[in-house]
Amino acid sequence: MIKQTQGQIYLAGQRGCTHLSWFRSFHTFNFGLYQDWNREPFGNLHAFNDDTLATGKSFKMQLEENTEVILIPVVGAIEYRNGLGKTGILEAGQMQVFSASKGMEYEISNPYETELVNFLQIFLINNQQPFIPNVQEITIDLETRNQLFLLFSPKQKGMTINQEAFGFIGKYSGRQEDVYHLTNPDHRIFVFIIEGAFEVQNRLLEARDGLSLWNLSKLEFEALSNDAIILIIEVNGG
């Protein structure tokens, strides 16, 4: 039997929202004008935004702190331009980490003429020194089912970041179970369901729901639907 652990659920329908005619952003944590006492950052995880951008539109962001900006297209592709002079197209099935120093900007555009794009925009604050701005990209393996794929870590596996944070993603068949063992029992876990439904530590989570957990050494979960996709981020407990 799975032990009930301390945690907080962020239901998809209870997220904050920035809504314009050409842009919609759902905020799991406080972001911009959305401020709620129980949506404070989770360790170094300061933003987790689920964004949809209309055709031909773009927006710019400026970082207030040294930040690992994680971009994950879910539907379609996004065009990017950043303060390091890097430009390109990031497609669904790929991921980018833009290690941006304080004050740096980046721009995201929808390159399509008729299609909306949907992507995740995640901020991990990084106060480690030295901090070296950088851009890294990786192709995500979701063809291999029922196991976790490493996205980033501080240990030269996946994409390397200069802080104690780990990211994993996995696509699972219905009724498949798995366990994620934390690298440090003092760390915390954030889970986000991209597609489908899962039971995570005795909690039902459906598409675009989030869950933060602490005081646990391993994370147990089971997919409740076919082609269900889970994102797991382990962060420093400080």
Image (cartoon, rainbow, N blue to C red):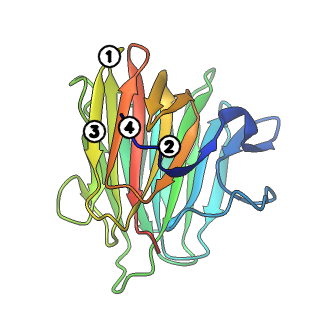
- Name the element at disc 3: strand
Say which label, 2 or 3, has the lower sequence index.
2
Residue 198, position as x, y percentages in the image: 45, 26
What is the spatial separation of the Cα atoms under label 4 and label 2, in whole angstroms?
A: 43 Å
Mark in front: 3 vs 1: 3
* Residue 76 in view: no
At label 1, the amino acid type is Ser
What is the spatial separation of the Cα atoms under label 3 and label 1, in whole angstroms?
A: 15 Å
What is the spatial separation of the Cα atoms under label 4 and label 3, in whole angstroms?
A: 11 Å
At label 4, the amino acid type is Ile
Say which mark, if any, is on residue 173: 1
Mark in front: 1 vs 2: 1
How crowded pointer 1 is (Cα within 10 Å; few <14, some 14-19, many 20+) is rated as: some
At label 3, the amino acid type is Val
* Residue 51 in view: yes
Residue at the disc numbered 2: 79
Say which label, 4 or 1, has the lower sequence index.
4
Q: Please report the residue visible at 64 percent of the width from the left and 57 percent of the height from the top.
A: 60
Say which label, 4 or 3, has the lower sequence index.
4
Residue 126, position as x, y percentages in the image: 44, 74
What is the spatial separation of the Cα atoms under label 1 and label 2, in whole angstroms?
A: 31 Å
Residue at the disc numbered 3: 179
Say which mark, if any, is on residue 2: 4
Q: Please report the residue visible at 44 percent of the width from the left and 35 percent of the height from the top.
A: 200
Q: Quadrant of residue 228?
A: top left
- Name the element at disc 2: strand
Residue in front for this viewpoint, 63 or 183 = 183
Residue 97, position as x, y percentages in the image: 39, 56
Mark in front: 4 vs 3: 4
- Name the element at disc 4: loop
How crowded pointer 3 is (Cα within 10 Å; few <14, some 14-19, many 20+) is rated as: few
